[in-house]
């Protein structure tokens, strides 16, 4: 087995990239965010119908959260709220557009189509007038002389004044939160499309008009995620379908893919779309059952049959993904506002609390028309989306051969008061190098130095070694080598 050079980069235990599964008995598990309080309420007239796709952008002034309130005639706009800490939010009085129906005008894009995503472009060569970019479905003139619905780009110098700039691709459907970013080398864009369309070869690349021309698509086709690349945000590659290691073909409505700030890995929180064939006796007992609502509150016939939750995915290359199929976020205990199409639409991006956790958010009551919409805050441990875990019965995690830089090992871990972790260092063939195990590691910390009585990591720096973690009632989230 060849060695993996990890240098001094943080390694997260969300997949088996550095884990030798043949020698490991600890089990993988997904963890769940902890719901906290409502930090804001969207209560204007146009916001009481429905709100979609909260999207967080960090800039030198703090945080902007873009969102889409829907008019009652289903023509959304894009609005923004702001915060310096992720706890207290306010609406800026922008008045960029003359919109008399709005009590407070914080609109940045008017009459947008469904699914507008905004990001701050970190490409050092990006023109200053395009530092903020938004992508979404729009009609634009293409080079072939035709005006077509496409995934298009808006640009802005300040995050408030956006101009529709240019088309990106027409191959997809786009009525979702499609995402884009500069990954340090090129632009990457993930967006929604379909496969398993009746009468269509899955290998065909269809534009949005061809996809919607298939009337049976909704009953049989599968919502999926495609990826495209660009060096200049104008000329894009042909779309490729991303793949998952579980072999399952699960409909995914959004992707919420971003680069994780603490490690060199992509993460995503796609909404999992679950459409049952009929309303049955179980659904009839739910507080949100459509039969209990006025006909004016039911937008389409799938209302009530569709429910959504959220899963966690991660990838080293952005194309091949590890998916946890236990939900990362669920609709929660039943009430009149949940277990509907629109639950668990997690905010895009997270806010660093400055402590051991990130803040993430949802805008709730998606299909409760006439109600104010709460912005609910959740906390998730840094690196804590998933882990390798041990029960009260001892298990082990053994890494593949790794080469590191540094002289101390630091862990992000958690144990019970009864539980613990012991670390030993092996050569690439499994022979012990560390003259025994580390001192007992126990507690709950995102940065704990591992101490050995008779071993110094500098003696094996730059050489291939394995780490062995002996675990009891413990969770291991990540590790990093540092020089102290």
Image (spheres, grey):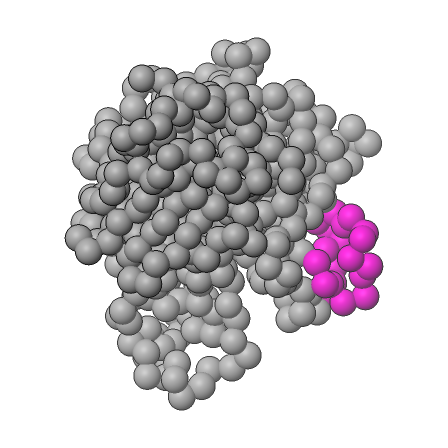
| Quadrant placement of the N terminus | top right
Q: Nearer the viewer, residue 249 or 15?
A: 15
Is residue 153 something one can see in this rendering?
A: no
**Location of residue 281 (image quadrant):** bottom left
**Location of residue 340 (image quadrant):** bottom left
- Residue 247: x and y, percent? 64, 61
- Residue at image coords 36%, 46%: 476
Q: Nearer the viewer, residue 260 or 15?
A: 15
Relative to 315, is 202 above or below? Answer: below
- Residue at image coords 38%, 21%: 407
Q: How many marks?
A: 0
- Residue 145: x and y, percent? 80, 31
Is residue 84 something one can see in this rendering?
A: yes
Provide the residue span drawn in magenta.
Answer: 195-215
| Quadrant placement of the C terminus | top left
Relative to 118, is 241 above or below? Answer: below
- Residue at image coords 81%, 66%: 199
């Amino acid at each position: 087995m060849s060695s993996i050079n990890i240098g001094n980069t943080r390694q997260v235990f969300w997949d088996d990239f550095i884990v030798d599964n043949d020698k490991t008995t600890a089990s993988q598990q997904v963890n769940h965010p902890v719901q906290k309080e409502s930090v804001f309420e969207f209560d204007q007239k146009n916001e009481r119908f429905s709100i979609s796709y909260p999207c967080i952008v960090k800039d030198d002034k703090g945080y902007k959260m873009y969102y889409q309130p829907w008019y009652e005639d289903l023509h959304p706009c894009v609005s923004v709220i702001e915060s310096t800490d992720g706890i207290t939010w306010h609406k800026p009085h922008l008045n960029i557009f003359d919109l008399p129906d709005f009590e407070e005008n914080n609109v940045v894009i008017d009459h947008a189509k469904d699914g507008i995503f905004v990001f701050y472009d970190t490409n050092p060569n990006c023109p200053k007038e395009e530092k903020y970019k938004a992508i979404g479905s729009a009609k634009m003139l293409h080079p072939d002389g035709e005006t077509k619905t496409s995934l298009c780009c808006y640009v802005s110098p300040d995050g408030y004044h956006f101009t529709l700039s240019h088309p990106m691709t027409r191959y997809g459907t786009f009525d979702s939160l499609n995402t884009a970013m500069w990954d340090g080398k090129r632009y990457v864009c993930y967006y929604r499309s379909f496969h398993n369309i009746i009468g269509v070869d899955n290998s065909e690349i269809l534009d949005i008009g061809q996809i919607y021309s298939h009337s049976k698509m909704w009953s049989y086709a599968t919502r999926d995620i495609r990826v495209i690349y660009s060096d200049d945000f104008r000329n894009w590659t042909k779309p490729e379908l991303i793949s998952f290691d579980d072999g399952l073909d699960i409909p995914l409505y959004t992707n919420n893919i971003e680069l994780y700030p603490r490690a060199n890995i992509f993460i995503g929180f796609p909404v999992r779309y679950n459409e049952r064939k009929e309303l049955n006796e179980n659904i009839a007992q739910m507080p949100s059952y459509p039969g209990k609502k006025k006909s004016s509150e039911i937008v389409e016939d799938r209302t009530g049959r569709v429910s959504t939750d959220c899963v966690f995915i991660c990838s080293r290359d952005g194309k091949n993904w590890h998916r946890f199929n236990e939900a990362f976020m669920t609709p929660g205990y039943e009430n009149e506002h949940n277990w509907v199409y629109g639950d668990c639409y997690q905010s895009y991006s997270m806010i660093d609390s400055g402590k051991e956790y990130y803040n993430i958010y949802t805008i709730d009551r998606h299909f409760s028309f006439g109600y104010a919409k709460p912005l609910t805050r959740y906390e998730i441990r840094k690196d804590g989306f998933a882990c390798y875990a041990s029960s009260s019965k001892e298990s082990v995690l053994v890494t593949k051969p790794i080469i590191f830089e540094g002289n101390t090992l630091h862990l992000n871990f958690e144990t019970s008061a009864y539980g613990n972790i012991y670390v030993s260092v092996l050569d690439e063939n499994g022979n012990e190098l560390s003259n025994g195990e580390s001192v007992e590691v126990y507690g709950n910390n995102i940065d704990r130095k591992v101490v050995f009585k008779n071993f110094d990591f500098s003696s094996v720096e730059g050489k291939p070694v394995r780490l062995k973690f002996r675990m009891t009632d413990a969770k291991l989230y990540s590790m990093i080598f540092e020089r102290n």
